[in-house]
Amino acid sequence: MTRATNAKIAGSAYLFYMAVGACNHFLMGRALSAEGTAAKLARIAEHAEDVRVSILLSLLECLSALVLVYGSADRACLGR
């Protein structure tokens, strides 16, 4: 791929990474906003759906980080 294409991929991955990370932070903050271990576990049980979505968002965040690395890597670094 050309440098322009790699730059477009890296830019899109970076924006996606930031958006997913912000959503993930918001959802987990809502589920973990309590004092003490028992209260946090109770909040997690109340917001189980948010925690599940947050786990999915964490996986998407990891995937977009890998795409970001690939898109921003120079061809010389990849051995091509």
Image: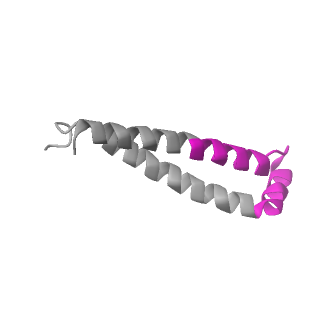
Q: Is residue 27 left or right of residue 79?
A: right
Q: Quadrant of the C terminus?
A: top left
Residue appearing at x 33%, y 36% in the figure: 7
The colour scheme applied to this rendered structure is one colour
Q: Is residue 5 left or right of residue 48?
A: left
- Tally the numbered discs: 0
The residue lying furthest to the left in this view is: 80
Whether residue 56 is situated above or below residue 18 in the rendered picture: below
Residue 69, picture quadrant: top left
Residue appearing at x 22%, y 45% in the figure: 1
Q: Is residue 19 left or right of residue 5?
A: right
Check if residue 39 falls in the magenta segment.
yes
Residue appearing at x 75%, y 63% in the figure: 48
Q: Position of residue 64 (x, y in %)?
A: 45, 48
Report the predominant secondary structure element of the magenta stretch: helix
Check if residue 44 falls in the magenta segment.
yes
The residue closer to the viewer here, 26 or 10, is: 10
Residue appearing at x 73%, y 58% in the figure: 50
Q: Position of residue 17 (x, y in %)?
A: 51, 43
Q: Which residues are magenta?
A: 19-48
Q: Is residue 80 left or right of residue 28?
A: left
